[in-house]
Image: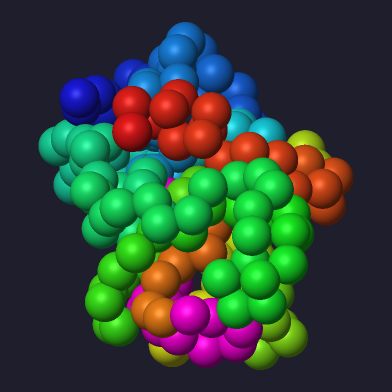
Amino acid sequence: MSHKLRLNDFTTTETNTKGSAVVKPISPNWKYGFSTLALCMAIAIPQFSGWVESQLPIRLLQQLAKTTNNVTESESTAFPTIKGSPITSGFGWRIHPLTGERKFHSGIDFGASKGTPIYAFEAGLVEFAGSRGGYGKAVIINHGAGKSTLYGHAKALSVRKGQRVVTGQMIGEVGNTGFSTGPHLHFEVRLNNKPVNPRPYLQQRGR
């Protein structure tokens, strides 16, 4: 899917109109919103709750539109690692493979070899990037409205705290750090810091 951007998409008499005033009229659904946000995020407009919130001179968007033909939503960019990676452990209660105890698993594990790319599931602000106990090397991305995602057991990280990322941006590499039985990506979705089942969110993306 792609949406061709035209100069008149950004027509306004105000030079500092909020980006949300531009995005919403030409983005009546999620897919158009994604395409436009991908363009806006390329010039570092902060994004929260799915819409642009901060101010940016519209003339910059007009200039960018001159050199942009299409913004395309890739089928693989919203998946947290390589599409087709098998789920090796689901969300919920399980027998822990290392301790043999019944424990709650707060995310989904994707089996993948060391060095496999890890991608940002959605655009947002990197809230944490570093070593995090049993999670090993991990990244937490704040998407706004109380929603965040966590990516654990990485071999290496390619983002830092305070950095803004776009959907599908590579943020690290799959590894075996922390409390882990082998190379994999541990992926969590959190609402108000409470882990919830990631499957519905993956299914919304057609995964």
Q: Is residue 75 above or below residue 80?
A: above
Of the 4 image quadrants, the one containing the C terminus is: top left
Is-magenta flag for residue 37?
Answer: no
Would residue 65 be found to the left or right of residue 191 on screen?
Answer: left
**Between 23 and 18, the one nearer to me in the picture:** 23
Quarter-wise, where is residue 102 in the image? bottom right
Q: Is residue 103 above or below residue 175?
A: above
Q: Position of residue 30 (x, y in %)?
A: 45, 21
Q: Residue at x 53, y 47 (%)?
A: 90
**Between 198 and 181, the one nearer to me in the picture:** 181
Quarter-wise, where is residue 106 in the image? bottom right
Predominant SS of the magenta segment: loop
Would residue 39 be found to the left or right of residue 52 on screen?
Answer: left
Q: How is the image coloured?
A: rainbow
**Magenta region: which residues?**
163-181
Residue 5 appearing in the image: yes
Q: Position of residue 4 (x, y in %)?
A: 21, 25
Residue 14 appearing in the image: no
How many circles with numbers are drawn on the protein?
Answer: 0
Q: Position of residue 53 (x, y in %)?
A: 68, 38
Q: Residue at x 54, y 81 (%)?
A: 180
Q: Residue at x 30, y 83 (%)?
A: 114
Q: Residue at x 41, y 71 (%)?
A: 184
**Between 67 and 87, the one nearer to me in the picture:** 87
Of the 4 image quadrants, the one containing the N terminus is: top left
Q: Position of residue 185 (x, y in %)?
A: 45, 67
Which residue appears farthest toward the left when viewing the image?
69
**Between 24 and 111, the one nearer to me in the picture:** 111
Would residue 158 be found to the left or right of residue 19 on screen?
Answer: left
